[in-house]
Image (spheres, rainbow, N blue to C red):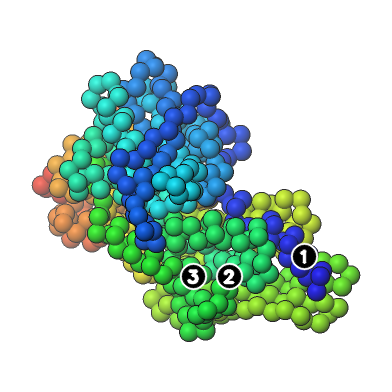
């Protein structure tokens, strides 16, 4: 029995989400020069769902002036994402914008834009210790509002702001900008870029949640308990996770599953309340809302429903071994055992733990849905030199899981996580959507180009646009087909589509009659930049199109 507890202590010390990379910093990332970190405090207090009073949020920020005139006159705010414990500092946030030996922030600064990194730190306010990276999204949004107001007061000239929100930062940005409009506060912001943000919720496999919570609560390991408290049970995680272990616990137990609660359930008094509040607030209407996501737009899954994540026996010593089986949540309407742990002493089982999951009838389990991916080996810090953990990682049959489902990143309210997105159902007016699932908040050359063109005043999106809404290029850059989404309020009884070279030469043209919600147009264009012109007989719209 002693060996069992020693093993659990070793395992839970490193088998934690504290090391998970919710926001990637790529290899060879470009970091900024050292500057002065400033503190900002919200002017509006926020009272959380489980708090007895309101508290003023705090943030820390650095301003990286442009390399043209060195004057604060064209600010772009880049927000922090989910980061309990503040393990990713301001320099790390800047570096996370790196791609292919370049950095998006550096490119923008060379073009005259000023980069403002707003981090959510650890702090004390009103006698309460707050972990900003896992705090209420709403309180962080109040900090953003103070940052926006300060920049608008300090900047030179009248250029409006741009706000880029990676991951949870996209929810903070959406909430803050919409709140300002709802309360007649001028944000002086022209563009909001959501970057793989969970507008309909995020996902960490429930099997992993059960496992780490079992180690914390049943074994009593302090390190594991800290992870549960600071990460899984943080206000932000409880607001965002569509399936949370707290929704499944047996009354009176801190780790046992209620056998009647097997369908996905959010954290009680947090998840549903937050989503309802966010939906009621909506999106800012005086700002251009666009999104770049990391989930596939063509239905490519992350593994498959019910797949075995790991099925292994780990040898601890000559007397003790442990059987561990973890699985993804199952196919629609199916039930499976997602967590199965058995500890053996001289081959005799001395402790077992099992949990069950059922997928709803309208969707397969979210773990394998198209989406920006999280990594189990990342969560384990690649083993951290621990031989047991390294053996566990080597035994993984499925490392990646859907962290931010495509439907969520597009803010489409569809209970089927696997449905093909109908972009006319999304509140965004322009999109970057890859064909393959990518690591969550990974910047690529293509997504960086999308962001650059939007920030450079929307060159990739709309020119000569007179529609009250817009046709939408579903994927840009395009691959083998040009996919055009048609919002419901736009006439497409007769639509003529034309592709021009960047020098103005007409290359392709087709007229469509009674077009439905989406057009698929095959092409044989070479890689490069083109102009797509759409004419429905009422108005013209042009879109800058990139072919990979």
- Vertical placement of 423 versus 450: above or below? below
Task: Judge the density around disc 1: few (<14), some (14-19), many (≥20) Cα neighbours within 10 Å.
Answer: some
Q: Nearer the viewer, residue 129 or 111?
A: 129
Examine the rendered structure and indicate whether residue 163 appears above or below residue 322.
above
Task: Say few, some or many: other residues with alpha carbon within 10 Å of mark 2 (under 14 / 14 to 19 / 20 or more).
Answer: many
**Dot label at residue 210:** 2
Q: Is residue 536 left or right of residue 322?
A: left
| In contact (CB < 8 Å): disc 2 and disc 3 | no
- How far across and how far down the image is residue 218, in percent? 65, 72
The residue at which mark 3 appears reads as 246
**Percent coordinates x, y for residue 340 in the rendering:** 65, 76
Residue farthest along the bottom direction in this orientation: 260
Who is closer to the viewer here, 170 or 319? 319
Question: As drawn, is 542 to the left or to the right of 445?
Answer: left
Give residue 7's mark.
Answer: 1
Q: Residue at x 78, y 70 (%)?
A: 4
Quadrant assignment, res 326: bottom right
Query: For the residue labelled by badge 2, is the local secondary structure a helix, a strand or a loop?
Result: helix
Q: Quadrant of the N terminus?
A: bottom right
């Amino acid at each position: 029995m002693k060996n069992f507890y020693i093993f659990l202590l070793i395992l839970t010390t490193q088998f934690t989400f504290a090391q998970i990379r919710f926001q990637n910093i790529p290899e060879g990332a470009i970091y900024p020069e050292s500057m002065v970190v400033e503190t900002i405090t919200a002017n509006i207090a926020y009272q959380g769902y489980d708090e007895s009073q309101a508290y003023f949020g705090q943030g820390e920020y650095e301003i990286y002036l442009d390399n043209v005139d060195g004057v604060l006159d064209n600010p772009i705010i880049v927000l922090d994402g989910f980061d309990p414990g503040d393990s990713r500092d301001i320099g790390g946030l800047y570096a996370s914008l790196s791609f292919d030996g370049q950095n998006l922030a550096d490119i923008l600064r060379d073009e005259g834009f000023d980069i403002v990194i707003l981090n959510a730190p650890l702090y004390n306010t009103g006698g309460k210790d707050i972990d900003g990276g896992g705090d209420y999204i709403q309180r962080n949004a109040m900090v953003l509002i103070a940052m926006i107001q300060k920049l608008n007061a300090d900047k030179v000239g009248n250029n409006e702001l741009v706000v880029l929100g990676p991951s949870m930062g996209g929810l903070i940005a959406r909430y803050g900008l919409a709140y300002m409009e709802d309360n007649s506060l001028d944000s002086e912001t022209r563009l909001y870029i959501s970057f793989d943000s969970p507008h309909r919720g995020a996902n960490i496999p429930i099997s992993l949640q059960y496992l780490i919570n079992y180690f914390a609560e049943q074994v009593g390991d302090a390190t594991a308990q800290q992870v549960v408290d600071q990460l899984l049970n943080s206000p932000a995680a409880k607001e965002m996770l569509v399936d949370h272990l707290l929704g499944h616990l047996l009354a009176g137990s801190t780790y046992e599953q209620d056998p009647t609660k097997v369908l996905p359930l959010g954290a009680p008094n947090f998840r549903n309340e937050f989503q309802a509040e966010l939906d009621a607030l909506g999106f800012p209407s005086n700002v251009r809302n666009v999104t770049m996501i990391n989930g596939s737009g063509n239905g490519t899954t992350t593994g498959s429903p019910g797949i075995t994540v790991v099925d292994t026996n780990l040898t601890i010593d000559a007397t003790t071994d442990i059987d561990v089986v973890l699985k993804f949540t199952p196919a629609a309407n199916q039930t499976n055992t997602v967590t199965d742990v058995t500890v053996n002493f001289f081959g005799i089982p001395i402790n077992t733990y099992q949990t069950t999951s059922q997928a709803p009838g309208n969707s397969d389990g979210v773990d394998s849905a198209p989406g920006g991916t999280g990594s189990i080996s990342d969560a384990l810090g690649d083993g951290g030199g621990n031989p047991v953990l390294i053996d566990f990682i080597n035994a993984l049959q499925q490392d990646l899981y859907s962290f931010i489902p495509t439907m969520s990143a597009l803010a489409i309210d569809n209970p089927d996580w696997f449905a093909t997105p109908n972009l006319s159902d999304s509140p965004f007016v322009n999109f970057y959507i890859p064909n393959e699932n990518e690591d969550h908040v990974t910047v690529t050359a293509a997504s960086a180009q999308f962001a650059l063109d939007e920030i450079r005043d929307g060159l990739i999106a709309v020119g000569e646009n007179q529609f009250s809404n817009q046709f939408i290029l579903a994927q840009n850059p395009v691959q083998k087909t040009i996919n055009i989404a048609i919002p419901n309020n736009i006439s497409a009884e007769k639509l003529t589509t034309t592709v021009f070279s960047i020098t103005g030469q007409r290359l392709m043209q087709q007229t469509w009659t009674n077009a439905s919600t989406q057009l698929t147009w095959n092409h044989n264009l070479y890689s490069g930049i083109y102009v797509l012109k759409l004419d429905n007989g009422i108005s013209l719209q042009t879109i800058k199109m990139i072919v990979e």
